[in-house]
Image (cartoon, grey):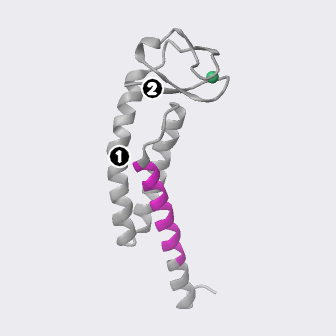
């Protein structure tokens, strides 16, 4: 299983294998020589990628449940947690799991809709304004 690595010259992605660690690899797009860090942690990246898929499923289910039950804290937490996993994936220069991206969008939409509904209820009942 390869690891996506962004070329520092042309910014396009190339696939690295664990045997590339600590070696100089030519970019397949621009032929620039890339020094692959010796300490590029393939094991951690692989296990984080597998974890992302697992978390993505859970967070997507939670955002649907939180949305249907109109539970604002749940959708807000899902948004926060999925954002954290997406940021980690970007840090490790790999694609974020699509399940995480979907969970974050769904949680953000559900959070905003519920906020608007609650503001509407408060304004409508004369609690605010
Ligand atoms: Zn390149």
Residue 110 lies in the magenta stretch:
yes
In the image, residue 75 sits, relative to residue 126, either above or below, namely above
Q: Residue at x 50, y 65 (%)?
A: 109
In the image, residue 81 sits, relative to residue 62, either above or below, namely above
Q: Which quadrant of the rendered structure holds the C terminus?
A: bottom right
Q: Which residues are magenta?
A: 99-116
Q: Residue at x 50, y 12 (%)?
A: 38
| Foreground: disc 2 or disc 1 | 2
Dot 2 crowding, Cα within 10 Å, few <14, some 14–19, many 20+ = some
In the image, taking residue 44 as reference, residue 87 lies left or right, namely: right
Q: Position of residue 93 (x, y in %)?
A: 53, 31
For marks 2 and 1, give the CA distance. Answer: 20 Å
Q: Secondary structure at mark 2?
A: strand
Q: Position of residue 92 (x, y in %)?
A: 50, 30
- The quarter of the displayed image where residue 77 is located: bottom left
Q: Position of residue 12 (x, y in %)?
A: 60, 29
Q: Which mark is residue 55?
A: 1
How many numbered discs?
2
Tell which circle, 2 or 1, labels the residue nearer the N-terminal end. Answer: 2
- Determine the residue located farthest toward the top in the rendered image: 23
Q: Image quadrant of ligand 1? A: top right
Q: Secondary structure at mark 1?
A: helix
In the image, taking residue 65 as reference, residue 8 lies left or right, namely: right
Q: Which quadrant of the rendered structure holds the N terminus?
A: top left
Q: Position of residue 79 (x, y in %)?
A: 47, 55
Q: Residue at x 47, y 41 (%)?
A: 96
- The quarter of the displayed image where residue 10 is located: top right
Residue marked by disc 2: 3
């Amino acid at each position: 299983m390869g690891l996506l690595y962004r070329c520092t010259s042309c910014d396009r992605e190339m696939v690295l294998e664990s045997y590339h660690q600590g070696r100089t690899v030519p970019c397949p797009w621009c032929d620039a020589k890339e020094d692959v860090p010796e300490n590029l942690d393939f094991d951690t990246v692989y296990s984080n990628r597998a974890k992302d898929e697992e978390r993505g499923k859970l967070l997507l289910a939670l955002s649907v449940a939180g949305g249907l039950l109109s539970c604002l804290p749940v959708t807000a937490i899902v948004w926060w947690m999925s954002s954290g996993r997406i940021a980690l994936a970007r840090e490790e220069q790999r694609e974020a799991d699509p399940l995480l991206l979907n969970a974050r969008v769904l949680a953000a939409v559900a959070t905003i809709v519920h906020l608007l509904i609650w503001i509407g209820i408060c304004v409508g009942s004369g609690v605010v304004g």
